[in-house]
Image: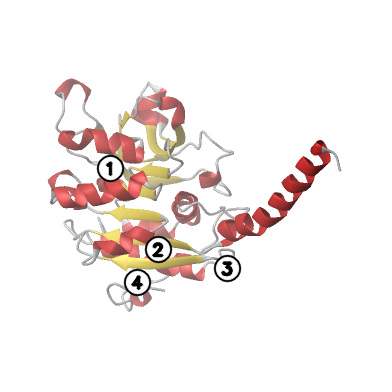
Amino acid sequence: MSRLARYFLCLGVITVLLLPQQAAAADRPRKIVLIAGKKSHGPGEHEYVKSVKLLKLLLDRSPNLKGITTETYFNGWPDDPSVLDAADTIVLISDGMEWLPYTFSEDRVQKLQKEMDRGCGFLALHFTTYVPIQYAKQGLEWDGGFFDYDGDPSVRSAQKTIETNINLPAKDHPVVRGVTPYRYKEEFYYKIHFAPDSASIVPLVSVPVLSDKPQEQIVGWAYQRRNGGRSVGMTFGHYYDNWKLDDYRKLILNAIVWTSGADVPAGGVLSKFVEETEVNKIPDNVRN
């Protein structure tokens, strides 16, 4: 047998051996950790705990989503942070500013940094995108962008509550798979500060009436981190009733699945809204 023939024979054997491992890695269950902060607004607004419990039900019950496990934690942080070590994505729904879960202590910042460094997915929703300027570096590295509320006053981010139509600029991105543009009332955060490597930022949702500048219109984005980790920032999520909108749910569920490294199903993640009485039956810190 010639040297070239032996080379291709060895290459073929290696390929056959690796294929099952690659397939297993692609098909393995994805662990989604959903973390809710404490409620700070009136009824129907910033319903973090109810939203996390609802998301768990929607993910667990989706008829076209397989290989997903979900864990829920409340009070802004798990009692045992080691549960984050095996997370494929971490979803934070909480107040921002000084109340942001990972700014209570430097230990939390370091813990999340460790998870981001290993390529864990990350999704910050609504008020969670508010990041103190002292953590601007983390806000940019982890999520690709953040809402600046205490930096240079001339370039701070802004917010506006309005009923309007949204645009989906990246129609081919998995996060917007199966989503149709819709009109709704929302408290939008905009004029977001984005990472310097803006080529890695994919605008997912924009609201033209917010600004004359296209980049300032972006209220939802995807970010492929340099180490392969996937992140999404969504500045909307103020009103709990918006979960009743099919496309709104699908957009956020798609984002969770995509950041976990799993494939978003064709047509997007299917779900049916679950009434509040059933959501409230879920006890704290349920794992599935």
Going by the numbered disc 3, the residue's amino acid type is Pro
Is disc 4 surrounded by few (<14), some (14 to 19) or many (20+) residues within 10 Å?
few
Please tell me whether mark 3 sits on a helix, a strand or a loop: loop
Between residue 99 and residue 46, name the one nearer to us.
Answer: 99
Comes first in the chain, label 3 or label 2: 2
Q: Residues within 10 Å of mark 3 (few under 14, many from 20)?
A: few
Residue 110 position (above or below residue 198):
below
Is residue 48 visible in this depiction of the protein? Answer: yes
- CA distance for labels 3 and 2: 14 Å
Which residue is at 39% across, 33% downward?
A: 218
Quadrant of residue 93 in the image?
A: bottom left
The residues bearing labels 2 and 4 have C-alpha atoms spaced at a distance of: 12 Å
Expressed as whole percent of the image width and height from the top left, the position of residue 258 reads 49, 50
Q: Which residue is disc 3 drawn over?
A: 63
Mark 1 neighbour class, 10 Å CA radius: few under 14, some 14 to 19, many 20 or more: many
Helix, strand or loop for disc 4:
helix
The answer to which of marks 2 and 4 sits earlier in the sequence is 2
From the viewer's side, name the closer residue of 259 and 146.
259
Cα separation between marks 4 and 3? 20 Å
Query: Nearer the viewer's eye, disc 4 or disc 3?
Result: 3
The residue identified by callout 4 is 276
**Mark 1: which amino acid?**
Thr
Query: Residue type at mark 4?
Result: Glu
Quarter holding the N terminus?
top right
Q: Which residue is mark 1?
A: 129
| SS category of the residue bearing label 2 | helix
Residue at the spot of label 2:
55
Q: Determine crowd level at label 2: few under 14, some 14-19, many 20+ residues with C-alpha closer than 10 A.
A: many
Q: Position of residue 96 (x, y in %)?
A: 20, 46
State the scheme by which the image is colored: secondary structure
Q: CA distance from mark 1 to mark 2?
A: 19 Å
Secondary structure at badge 1 equals helix
